[in-house]
Image (tube, rainbow, N blue to C red):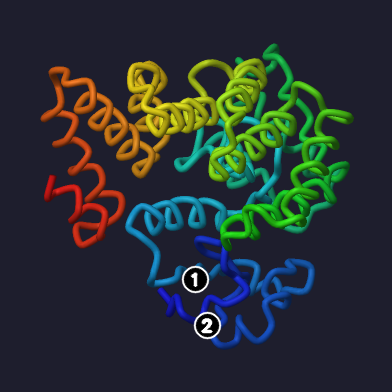
Amino acid sequence: MVPGIDWGDLAGNQCVIAFGRPTWDEFRKDQGKYADYSAMTPQDLTKRTVFIPNTNRPFEIRECLIEEITQALGPLNDIYGLGPSIFNDDDAHTWPTRLDYLMLRVLYDPEMKAGIRRREAHGRALKILKRINPDGIGAPRLPPHRQMDFINWRNALHTLFRLTNAGELRSSRVNDLLKAVLTEAERRAPDTAYHCEALSAVAHVEYEREDPDADDLIRDAGLVCERVHGLGDVRLATLRLAAGLHHLGQDSDRLALQNVAGLEKTFLAHGQDALIAMTYAVRWTALANLDRPGVEEARRKTLAWSAYAYGDDNETVRRWRRY
């Protein structure tokens, strides 16, 4: 845990992971040195350091510990379009998935030796997989992630997130990035994880801008994400929650309730504590506005999950307790 006030140009990152065991001051002086695995000694490659700002909320600290410790075990991460994996770069998964555990079993199998060349590693991995996961032999292939084809797209998306997190929602730079990210995905990868991510980014930004067309954009993003990831996917659930919040702001409380129905189950399965709290908050507000039964239970769950996600001393949690 390091001072959040010193986070500086790392703003927008909940936490960072470095090779070796640098101190916080050493890492801040030369971040690139501790991010390039090709420049590390074999001894440094066996070590990882995770830096987490002490200004993070409890749910962010938990997510950092789970994700970064898992990623420190070895596989490359932050790959868009990878599929159901914590090593994906779309923040959909908090906990390692079945695919992740399978890949870690391959990586740490005694037959997989460090330092071997790529072709030999590929051959050994196939042998290990046939032994530990024989049912996978006839399974459908996972979609290609095309990471190297979308480097510029990924950089543009990260810049977009950095600007919107800094509050620059209405700048011309944000408008240009939104257009570039969506156009690239629609042109080169329609109905893929890239398309889902691009449409979701546009929908969430327009929702934050209180655009009157935000509901239509959220719906369009949801249709693509459902085709790509399926009905029970957390990305689709996040879009439905955004739609619920949008309708709540428009005094369409019945539609808000419809949009958030059952979302807490999906969020719970993915360890999304803050989104569970927000789901119950939408339900509590809508039920209270409609004067329907269940208000007190929704309020109780909102307070419990909010305290768990944001901390018992969080200002929003204290304010909600007064209602």
Residue 124 as seen in the image, left or right of residue 151: left
Q: Residues within 10 Å of mark 1 (few under 14, many from 20)?
A: many
Residue 103 as seen in the image, left or right of residue 153: left
Q: Residue at x 70, y 40 (%)?
A: 80
Q: Which percent across, then down, holds residue 213?
A: 61, 29
Query: Is residue 19 among the parts visible in the rendering?
Result: yes
* Residue annotated with mark 2: 24
Could you tell me which quadrant the N terminus lies in?
Answer: bottom left
Which one is earlier in the sequence, the residue at label 1 or at label 2? 2
The Cα atoms of the two marked residues, 1 and 2, are separated by 8 Å
Q: Which percent across, then down, holds residue 212?
A: 58, 31
Q: Residues within 10 Å of mark 2 (few under 14, many from 20)?
A: some
Q: Kindly indicate the quadrant of the structure image that contains residue 247.
A: top left
Q: Furthest residue to the top? A: 138
* Residue annotated with mark 1: 51
Query: Helix, strand or loop at disc 2?
Result: helix
Q: Kindly indicate the quadrant of the structure image that contains residue 128.
A: top right
- Give the answer, above or below, for where 202 lies relative to 260: below
- Give the answer, above or below, for where 25 lies relative to 206: below
Q: Residue at x 65, y 87 (%)?
A: 29
Q: How many marks?
A: 2
Residue 80 as seen in the image, left or right of residue 134: right
Name the kind of residue labelled 1 in the image: Phe
Residue 311 as seen in the image, left or right of residue 220: left
- Give the answer, above or below, for where 306 lies relative to 291: below
**Marks 1,2: beta carbons within 8 A:** yes
Q: Which percent across, then down, holds residue 285?
A: 25, 32
